[in-house]
Amino acid sequence: MANFMKRNGKWQARVSWRDADGKLHQKSKAGFATKAQAKLYAAELESELGKGVDVSADPVFADYFEQWYRTYREPHLSKHSESQYIGSIKSIKSYFKKIKLKSINRSFYQQFINDFGKNHAKGTVERLHAQIRSCVKSAIADGIITRDFTYNVMLSYNDDLKRHVEYLSIAELKSLTKTVADDLSSKNIPAYMILVAIYTGARFSEILGLTWDDIDFDAKTIRINKTWDYHNHQGFLPTKTPHSIRTIRVNSRLLDYLKLLPDTSDRLFKIEGADYMNGRINRALKRYLKEAGIDKQGFSFHSLRHSHVAYLLSQGVDLYAISKRLGHANMSITSSVYAYFIDEYRRKSDNLIESKLDKL
């Protein structure tokens, strides 16, 4: 029920209602220039009440986002993903400050994305936007708001900050592979890990988590179903996503290399008392690149995964097969991450098609 009164030349609207337990609630707002404006406010408030919206709840958006993260996300995240959310919380608090959740509309949120995108790359903007969208859906489910202010917002980002994907040409990949293989010894764990990355495209933590049970020498496969926590030393952890669990086919040469490893542990790549950290492996990789005559300043262990993809694409391997091999949830992720590669090989294919058509 709504009541209206005029005070000091301005109109005030007061809406009263009872909750499911019969408790009386009231919400009022003053300062309307006309009674019609006050009635419109009351009508909108009563409409929200009719939809089950908790009109008495209007938290600060930054606070709600952090509480939503602590409740629904934090218990299920890896340390890496937690750090990404913490960064998002800082960005939201810095921009939105004490702005209430119900005060945010699509135009305001679009301006936030525009401003945030000026100093951030596409992937960072996409990640933050996805997190906020999930939070907003939760606010709608909680009955705090009725509209999704993230709907149909256009993402804006700084293309100059796009991370360049480093990879090796076929000749360079062959040269690196030979250089590393020539330096194999039972104690040279970095060399083995580099070769596994070259031949499988697996992630660093996935390779660290390999056990002898994961290697099927008869079927020529490697099973990837866990990772090794080299950041916080928590031992085995799940894969990045459930889709990352996979069995991939490998060649006999890699399996022959692995047979040379000493079988002294359940894990393939472990020396008692010393786990190989990412930095240590990268230093070894840089040394091998130099020995192979390859000058790639930004090349890292993860770049071997990119090189694996580039090589398979150059050999005409189907994108679907590559996506499954990498452990992506679907081909759209693969095509998004490796769009540069795909466009490059598409141009080569177009040139080939044109040359073939010229012969008709």
Image (cartoon, rainbow, N blue to C red):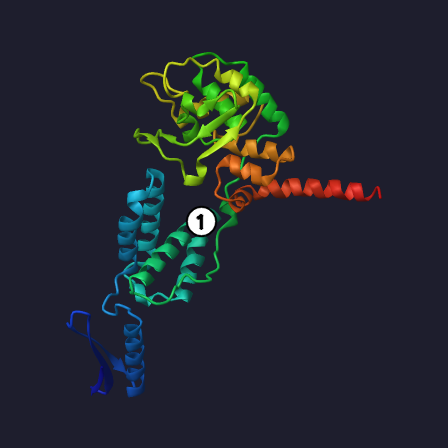
Q: Which quarter shows the C terminus?
A: top right
Counting the numbered discs, the total is 1
Secondary element at tag 1: loop
* Residue drawn where x is 30% and y is 30% of the image: 234
Which amino acid does the dot numbered 1 rest on? Answer: His
Coordinates of residue 354 in the picture (x, y in percent)? 77, 44
Q: Is residue 4 above or below residue 100?
A: below
Coordinates of residue 201 in the picture (x, y in percent)? 51, 31
Q: Is residue 131 above or below residue 284?
A: below
- 42 left or right, relative to 255: left
Q: Which residue in the structure is indicated by mark 1?
A: 120
Looking at the image, the residue that sits furthest to the right is 360
Viewer can see residue 286: no
Looking at the image, the residue that sits furthest to the front is 218
- 74 left or right, relative to 316: left
Q: Nearer the viewer, residue 323 or 177?
A: 323
Q: Is residue 314 above or below residue 286?
A: below
* Residue drawn where x is 43% and y is 24% of the image: 281
Q: Which quarter shows the N terminus?
A: bottom left
- 245 left or right, relative to 74: right
Q: Nearer the viewer, residue 313 or 88?
A: 313
Viewer can see residue 164: yes
Coordinates of residue 150 in the picture (x, y in percent)? 41, 61
* Residue drawn where x is 45% and y is 58% of the image: 114
Q: Nearer the viewer, residue 49 or 288?
A: 49
- Report which quarter residue 289 is drawn in: top right
* Residue drawn where x is 49% and y is 45% of the image: 161
Q: Is residue 150 above or below residue 333?
A: below
Coordinates of residue 81 in the picture (x, y in percent)? 36, 42
